[in-house]
Image (tube, rainbow, N blue to C red):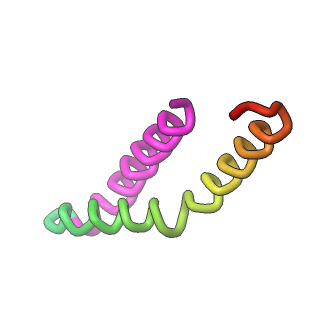
Amino acid sequence: MLQGYIKIQLGVLYIVELFANEDAQQASDGLSTAGYAIFNLQHQQLSQVFMFFNDWQLAMVVLLGVP
């Protein structure tokens, strides 16, 4: 549950920051900006971070012997 919460928080913060940075440049193109923000967030920015957390979580499960 914590992992999902972290993903949601990072995603919301990233999209808000992208809108703030590009709002003046593409005010009339908000829908495509939102689509790009979500694509960029999911496939380029946070994939490595979440893979690290998944690896860490798997290591803890193996070390602690939790099924």
Is 12 magenta? The answer is yes
Would residue 37 be found to the left or right of residue 6 on screen?
left
Which residue corresponds to the image point at 80% horizontal and 33% vertical from the top-left? 65
Q: Quadrant of residue 60?
A: top right
Q: How many marks?
A: 0
Q: Quadrant of residue 61?
A: top right
**The one of 62 and 17 positioned closer to us in this rendering:** 62
Tell me if residue 29 comes above or below residue 15 in the rendering: below
Tell me if residue 23 comes above or below residue 1 in the rendering: below
Q: Position of residue 43 (x, y in %)?
A: 48, 68
Is 40 magenta? The answer is no
Would residue 61 be found to the left or right of residue 10 on screen?
right
Which residue corresponds to the image point at 46% horizontal and 38% vertical from the top-left? 9
Q: Position of residue 25 (x, y in %)?
A: 28, 68
Q: Position of residue 14 (x, y in %)?
A: 45, 50
Q: Predominant secondary structure in magenta?
A: helix
Q: Position of residue 31 (x, y in %)?
A: 18, 63
Range shown magenta: 1-26
**The one of 27 and 41 positioned closer to us in this rendering:** 41
Residue with the most extreme right position: 63
Residue with the most extreme left position: 28
Instruction: Quarter of the image for the C terminus: give it.
Output: top right
Would residue 48 be found to the left or right of residue 17 on screen?
right
Which residue corresponds to the image point at 49% horizontal and 43% vertical from the top-left? 7
